[in-house]
Image (cartoon, rainbow, N blue to C red):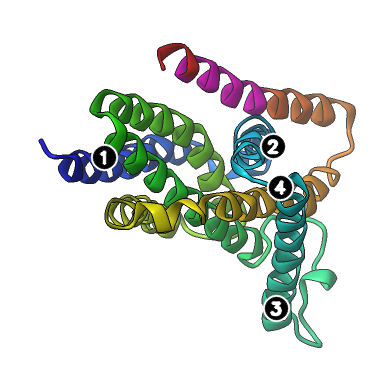
Amino acid sequence: MSAFTWILVSTVAGGILSVVAAGAVALNARISHVPVLISYAVGALLGAVFLDLLPEAFGRSDSLEQMAATILAGILVFFVLEKLVLWRHCHVEQCEAHDPPQVTHDHGRSGMMIMIGDTFHNFVDGVLIAAAFLANHELGIVTALAIIAHEIPQEVGDFLILLHSGYTRTRALLLNLLSSAAMVAGGVLAYFALQTMEQWIPPLLGLAVASMLYVSVADLIPGLHRRPELHATVQQVALIALGVATIWLVGELAHSTA
C-alpha cells in the first residue's frame, strides 16, 4: 500500500477503535456510578497531561517559555469559553451557581471543553501518524498502534466526562466519533503539507494540555469535594491513582514495543 493509504487506514481505524473500545467500557457503567467514575477520568486526564502530552509539548517546542505561555494562554481562553457557556445557561431565576448540591451535571460545560481539547489532540495524533509513515512504514505502524493504545483510556475518561456533563450516551458516542474524525483530517492534511503542519504541532499540543488540565482541575476535582466522607475520599484517591497508572502502563507498553 502507498503511504497515503496507510495513513488513511490507520487514522480511520485508530479513531473508530479507540471510541468503540471506550464506549464499550463506559456504556456498561451505570449512570449512578458516573460521579464515582469521574475520579478515574480525573486520573486519566492528569496522567495524559503530565506523563504524555506535556513532555511531548515541551520536547517539541523551541522555547520552554513560549510553550509555558501557550499553555497559560490556553487556560485563560478556556476560562473565557466556560464563562460564555455559563452566561448562556445562567439566568436570574435559574443558574448553576444556585442549583442544589445534588445536581450531578454541569450543563455541558466540561463536556464542551474536553471535546475541544480532544479534537486538538486527535488532530495532532493524525499529523504524527502521517509523519511516521512518510519516514518509514514500520515506524508508522508502531506509532499508530501506540497512539491507539494511548487513546483508549483517554477516550474512556472523555466519555465519562460527557455523561457527567449531562449528555445522553448516544450523543456522547456521536461526539466522540466526530472528535476522532480530526485524526483523519490531521493525517490527510499532514500528508499533503507536512512541513507546514509540523510547526503547528507544539502550539496545538499546548492547547490540548491547557484544555485537559483546566477541565480536570477547575471543573471535575471541585465536584469530588462534594463527598468529603473518608470512604468516598479513599475511593476517589484510589480511582485517580488507577487512572494515572493506566496511562503510565499504556505508555510503558508502547515504548517497549517501539
- The answer to whether 76 is drawn above or below residue 51 in the figure is below
Residue 89 falls left or right of residue 208 = right
Of the two numbered discs 1 and 3 on the same chain, state the one appearing first in sequence: 1
Task: Give the residue at mark 3.
Answer: 84
Mark 2 residue type: Leu
Local packing at callout 2 (Cα closer than 10 Å; few below 14, some 14-19, many 20+) is many
**What amino acid type is highlighted by mark number 3?**
Leu
Residue, disc 1: 13
- Per the model, the C-alpha gap separating discs 1 and 2 is 26 Å
Instruction: Identify the mark nearer the N-term, 4 or 1.
Output: 1
Q: Is the magenta stretch mostly helix, strand or loop?
A: helix
Q: Can you give x and y, in whole percent of width and height, for residue 169 in the image?
A: 44, 53
Query: Looking at the picture, which amino acid does disc 1 mark?
Result: Ala
Give the label on residue 46, or none.
Answer: 2
* Residue 98: quadrant of the picture: bottom right
Q: What stretch is highlighted in magenta?
A: 242-254
Using the numbered discs, state the Cα–Cα distance from disc 1 to disc 3 in whole angstroms. 35 Å
Q: Distance between the residues labelled 2 and 4?
A: 23 Å
Mark pair 4, 1: CA separation: 34 Å
Marks 3 and 4, the one that precedes in the sequence:
4
- Which residue appears at 54% of the width and 46% of the height? 158
Q: Is residue 78 magenta?
A: no
Element under label 4? loop
Residues 215 and 86: in front is 215
x, y percentage for residue 131? 36, 41
Q: Are marks 1 and 2 in contact (CB under 8 Å)?
A: no
Which is more toward the observer, 224 or 131?
A: 131
Specify the quadrant of the image occupied by residue 11: top left
Image-based side of 241 in relation to 153, left or right: right
Between 71 and 112, the one lying in front of the other is: 71
